[in-house]
Image: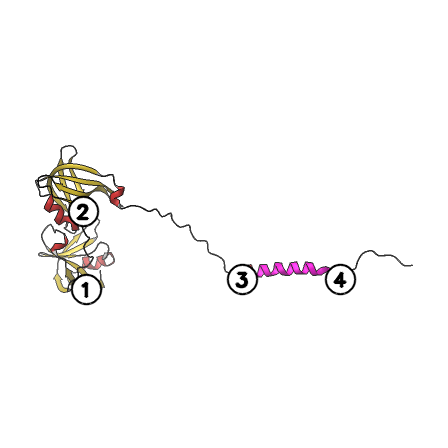
Amino acid sequence: MEQDNDVEPLTMKNYRPLLVVIIILLLVIIWLLIKPPVPLLPKAPIQLDRPPMERLQKQRIITGIVTRYKNNPHLDINSLELKTEKAGSITIDFRPHTAAWVTRIGTIGELVTVTYGLNPSDKVVGYQLIAIKNNRTGISQTLEDLPPPPDVPNQQTEKFKLEKPVLITDQYGGIVALRKNNLLFHFKPGLVDDIAHLIKESDIFHLVAVRRQDDQGFININHDKVYIVLSITIDNKTFLVR
């Protein structure tokens, strides 16, 4: 007795579409495993086009009499004290290389008009000089018009041997200079921090330095001859510091 069977028997032809799908899935999985992962980069900080500090400052103008000048840890003049009627005595900072122009216009005892602004930094908040005018002579100077000095003077190097020089530090204990008689050997801030302990424990130093010329605008409070140190040798070990 024959029985009708309407169900088509399973063959490779029936499995072919399923096999294609499986093969494609396997290839995708293999590709994902082999492909190197894309690192997740941190978001870039938002960059703002910030104008120069002088433009960010709220500029103020005040008139007063120059009473004295102050210096930074390197013994370079970098601020003036002004006696005013409205604000009393105030101190206004300026960049050391502008001292020659500022002191020439604002002689002690002279009445001046200054433009200044608030200059916040990482460590202090103070007043920053923008321009100065002598009320008697009419001579004035905008400080941003003055060129900056070279980092290292373009001159022939000189060698020195110092025995027991005076160690000059800033208010935080960082070494900023060595001084011997009327010679001052200037270190750029932070460049000798790693060897500060060697400098403090030593008495004899061999230096290679270049003279900072007086026409660059700096004024040393003691009128020392200032040298920019390029290298320092301690116990036969030489360290480049510029």
Q: Amino acid at mark 2?
A: Leu
Q: CA distance from mark 4 to mark 1?
A: 90 Å
**For the residues carrying marks 4 and 1, which lies nearer the camera in this image?**
4
| Residue type, mark 4 in image | Thr
Please state the horizontal and vertical placement of residue 9, each as a whole percent of the image.
Answer: 79, 60
Task: Bin the neighbour count of mark 3 within 10 Å (Cα to Cα): few under 14, some 14-19, many 20 and up.
Answer: few
Label 4: which secondary element: loop
Q: Which residue is mark 2?
A: 143
Q: Earlier in the sequence, mark 1 or mark 2?
A: 2
The residue that mark 1 highlights is: 233
- Gap between marks 3 and 4 measured at Cα: 34 Å
* Amino acid type of the residue that numbered disc 3 sits on in the rendered structure: Ile
Q: Quadrant of residue 15?
A: bottom right
Q: Which residue is mark 4?
A: 11
Disc 2 vs disc 4: which is toward the camera?
Answer: 2
Majority SS type along the magenta span? helix
Q: Is residue 148 left or right of residue 104?
A: right
Instruction: Judge depth for marks 3 and 1 and give the one in front.
Output: 3
- Is the residue marked by circle 1 packed among few (<14), some (14-19), or many (20+) residues within 10 Å? some
Part of the protein shown in magenta: 12-30
Mark 2 lies on a secondary structure that is helix
How many angstroms separate mark 2 from mark 3 (CA)? Answer: 62 Å
| Residue contact between numbered discs 4 and 1, judged by CB atoms under 8 Å | no
- Residue at numbered disc 3: 34
Residue at 56% of width from left, 61% of height from top?
A: 31
